[in-house]
Amino acid sequence: MPQYWWVNHKQTWQQEIEGQYLWSPKINANGSRNEFYNNMRRGSPGDLVLSYADQHIGHVGRLAEFAFAAPKPEEFGTVGANWSRDGWLLPVYWTKLVPPIRPKDLIDRLRPLLPDRYSPFNPATARGNQGAYLAEISEPLFNVIVSSAAFDLALLARGGSNSLSYESVVEVIEDIIERKITDDLTLDDTVRKSLIDARRGQGVFRSNLEKLESACRLTGITNASLLKASHIKPWRACETAQERLDGMNGLLLTPDADHLFDRGFISFGDGGDVLVSTRVDREDLRRLGFDQLVFEATGLMEAPAGWRINGFLAGQRPYLDYHRQHVYLS
Amino acid sequence: MPQYWWVNHKQTWQQEIEGQYLWSPKINANGSRNEFYNNMRRGSPGDLVLSYADQHIGHVGRLAEFAFAAPKPEEFGTVGANWSRDGWLLPVYWTKLVPPIRPKDLIDRLRPLLPDRYSPFNPATARGNQGAYLAEISEPLFNVIVSSAAFDLALLARGGSNSLSYESVVEVIEDIIERKITDDLTLDDTVRKSLIDARRGQGVFRSNLEKLESACRLTGITNASLLKASHIKPWRACETAQERLDGMNGLLLTPDADHLFDRGFISFGDGGDVLVSTRVDREDLRRLGFDQLVFEATGLMEAPAGWRINGFLAGQRPYLDYHRQHVYLS
């Protein structure tokens, strides 16, 4: 069952529509949590969202992926300068709503359907709530809006292209960071090369990591040709060269485990307990060969013999904390 | 047990030592097979190799990876212009042998140890055989050479760095190809972007592939966020834009399956039978969750219920044929 959302774009609505995404900071400028920003992480692929800007709903979108940690898009330029650099990026396929709908015109039908708390729309003023960004709405509310207009549902369902896949979007973000590293004249050549190699889990980063970890934490495999050097705090999210090359900021994982960890479908507690997101399908985990993760997730299966993960080193824990907070899809 | 090898470098010995590899064409210029080129694919990580050039053995190497299909290194320049562009690259950690050994000086001790067929060294002339490139030798022969000199065995075993990993070497090769695509003014911008996106299994290539395949052939998983778009004939080996974007030249595979397929540890027959290389460890396959592959490899395990792979489309078969010949580690 899809969820339904309503976004009140800020000054960057054109960038978000053209760029096929939503982006928000993770927290308020004063450091406090923000329900509307947290909603970015609650959206799932397939959810539908109404785009509200300039008093009109002009687009309907389908979430293409789960949100992931990403720096503020370059194309925002100086807009939103007060927003923190660190945020959530949510890839969305947008399609036009024709004609655009002015919710004010439908206020009598909308009023009983608007949520009591965290409403995106103020029934008293018949305008979007300034403080709201991404708000959950009910299916009936969604239907009232779209039933007065037309949009290409088939195109929306199909998505048109896969340019919004996690891999594609991350590739673009990381390419930008890599170019900055390449152009950074304060770095010496060796460091520059190490930082770029670290993006793919190679070079100095992998050597540093191999001094600390020797096997995949989930499968026990020690054969280096089957192991990926995975950053715990993602390469794109690291703030210093030290973080990008720190062996403590890595795990050796087999390709499936690396993928699940990188996408936030699994994470680890400091003591070595495995966290399995409710947003990954149990049957998929079983097909991937992770019966032990199905056990962790449900408690319904018996853990395989010898299934135990060692606790993590003190130096790994701050990175794992980041992973649990910012990558893991809790 | 490691195997022992002897390479007679041609004009490119300096490039091969400095670049930390061996490279050979796959076949002779006249199209016939060549035992010494085929040996490139018989080497395994950990094997030891003697480097013979200019009548001296000046280096000892340890194979860092299995050989893989790679174009002729750029740094060969115009040397070896008669060699085909398409060849095998074998990453090798080299370390100096001090002093260099002249086999001619040891000919009496070497003569009884040289192989009868495909010998790298001619006992009559006491010179390297012109026609030989990579030749297998016995451990005693290897020991006769190295026992008269010194080399840093610990460094050789450790390898010094992981800059020779499959991933690192392929990344360098593919970066060169990507730069050529970027600089190719005959391509229009859309095609150029598609070709570069295809390197990571994204964009038009993935869309084309998704019209033909909908699930991982090995696990049955259909969840797109767990599937990689893998080229059958590797992106770096494709000769035309059409091959790089052809949906027929791809499979959707989960990350482990993608990795095994990409590294040549598994392949497929046209009818859908799975080929499992003898060079992948059975216990590793089991830990990766591929009990069914252990079955395919040994016949000793029962195939899981429902384990069946559909045959491939006519358009996929030429690419699979390439994979079996040039990627699969038979």
Image (tube, coloured by chain):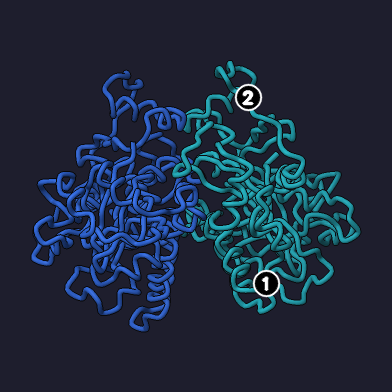
Chain colours: A blue, B cyan
The residue indicated by pointer 2 is: B308
Q: Which amino acid lies under the numbered mark 2 shown in the image of this protein?
A: Arg
| Quarter where residue B69 is shown | bottom right
Q: Residues within 10 Å of mark 2 (few under 14, many from 20)?
A: some
Residue in the foreground of this view, choosing between B46 and B298: B298
Callout 1: SS: helix
Foreground tag (1 vs 2): 2
A311 relative to B194 in the view: left or right: left
From where the camera sits, is residue A301 visible? yes
Q: Where, quadrant-wise, is the N terminus of chain A in this rendering? A: top left
Residue in the foreground of this view, choosing between A205 and B136: A205
Q: Earlier in the sequence, mark 1 or mark 2?
A: 1
Q: Residues within 10 Å of mark 1 (few under 14, many from 20)?
A: few
A185 relative to A109 in the view: left or right: right
A56 relative to B179 in the view: left or right: left
Residue in the foreground of this view, choosing between A124 and A212: A124
The residue indicated by pointer 1 is: B74
Report the residue that reaches farthest toward the bottom. A185
B117 relative to B25 in the view: left or right: right
